[in-house]
Image (spheres, grey):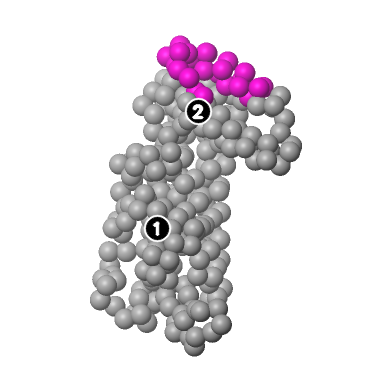
């Protein structure tokens, strides 16, 4: 992304530069998709140790694979939209926002310096996710308290099995996504100028229809005044998509690399 001086390009040149930058990003996406397909977990690895400590409910690697698949899938959908040549102007930013979030959670989960810290983050996340489901099922009239109580019991047993976190309360809400992104940004080196938090905020602005964000990120085409009052047509900007996709692919690469690194054998460690 640093190859282009976006501010001093014409719109046509920005389009071409964005297209070129996106193709480089999509090439990196394909490499990470292949890495995910070839990912193997060694029985003496750090992640195997995490799995053993979380197996009572859902293994750590299962959660990580789910999040990585989500991140890659959202980026792949952006790729598919770009390759159609008929890109909806707003939707790709929602996809990029989700990709950044999922990759960030993978890095955050594995960022704990100790097994106890990683396990507690995992437990806290599972409980927060369940509370989100409770909010939905309650409003939909389908809430089943027994499921929540069972999960609470499982997570409590998992926590109590780790002496270092036995006294901690996992019902305290996990950090906000912005706090998680701030932490992850210290670990991910983004070469394009925008870090993950900045890109996530911009993508969120477009997702929520904030015209102050869309004005800067979408191209506009003048149109005659009509009875709805619109005077411009919003068009997708490949330059903006490339700018926001750069942190998203950096996050995914870091998440994949961390996961594969933690899946490698550790000599002298027992198989788990």
Residue 136, position as x, y percentages in the image = 65, 40
Q: In this figure, which residue is indicated by the disc labeled 2?
A: 124
The reply to whether residue 22 is in sight is no
Q: Earlier in the sequence, mark 2 or mark 1?
A: 2
Q: Position of residue 29 (x, y in %)?
A: 47, 57
The stretch in magenta equals: 149-171
User: For the view shown, which residue lies furthest in the bottom direction?
Assistant: 224
Viewer-nearest residue: 168 or 136: 136
Above or below, 227 against 240 in this view is: below
**The stretch drawn in magenta includes residue 272:** no
- Image position of 110 (left or right of 82): left
Could you say which is closer to the camera, residue 1 or residue 49?
1
Instruction: Identify which residue, 117 or 223, lies in the foreground.
Output: 223
Q: Decide whether the magenta segment is chiefly helix, strand or loop.
A: helix
Image quadrant occupied by the N terminus: bottom left
Proximity of marks 2 and 1: CB atoms separated by less than 8 Å:
no
Secondary structure category for the residue under label 2 = helix
Q: Residue at x 65, y 26 (%)?
A: 148
- The residue under the point 53% across, 63% down is 91
Identify whether 69 is placed above or below 267.
below
Q: Position of residue 223 (x, y in %)?
A: 48, 86
Q: Which residue is mark 1?
A: 202
Q: Residue at x 52, y 57 (%)?
A: 95
What's the distance in space between the residues labelled 2 and 1, CA to CA?
27 Å
- Asked if residue 92 is positioned above or below residue 236 in the image, the reply reads above
Question: Is 198 displayed left or right of 56 in the figure?
Answer: left
Q: Is residue 151 magenta?
A: yes
């Amino acid at each position: 992304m640093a190859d282009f001086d976006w501010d001093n390009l014409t719109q046509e040149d920005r389009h071409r530069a964005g297209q070129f930058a996106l193709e480089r990003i999509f090439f990196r996406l394909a490499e990470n998709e292949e890495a995910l397909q070839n990912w193997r977990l060694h029985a003496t690895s750090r992640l195997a140790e995490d799995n053993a400590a979380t197996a009572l409910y859902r293994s750590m690697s299962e959660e990580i694979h789910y999040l990585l698949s989500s991140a890659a899938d959202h980026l792949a959908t952006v790729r598919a939209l770009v390759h159609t040549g008929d890109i909806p102007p707003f939707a790709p930013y929602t996809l990029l926002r989700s990709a950044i979030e999922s990759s960030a959670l993978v890095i955050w989960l594995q960022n704990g310096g100790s097994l106890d810290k990683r396990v507690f983050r995992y437990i806290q996340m599972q409980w927060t996710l369940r509370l989100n489901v409770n909010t939905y099922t309650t409003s939909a009239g389908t809430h089943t308290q027994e499921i929540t109580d069972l999960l609470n019991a499982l997570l409590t047993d998992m926590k109590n099995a780790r002496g270092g976190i036995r006294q901690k309360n996992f019902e305290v809400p996990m950090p906000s996504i912005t706090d998680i992104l701030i932490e992850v940004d210290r670990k991910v080196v983004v070469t394009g100028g925008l870090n993950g938090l900045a890109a996530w905020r911009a993508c969120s602005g477009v997702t929520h229809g904030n015209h102050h964000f869309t004005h800067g990120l979408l191209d506009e085409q003048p149109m005659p005044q009509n009875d709805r009052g619109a005077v411009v047509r919003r068009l997708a900007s490949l330059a903006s998509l490339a700018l926001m996709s750069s942190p998203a692919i950096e996050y995914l690469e870091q998440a994949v690399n961390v996961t594969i690194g933690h899946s490698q054998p550790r000599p002298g460690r027992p198989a788990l």
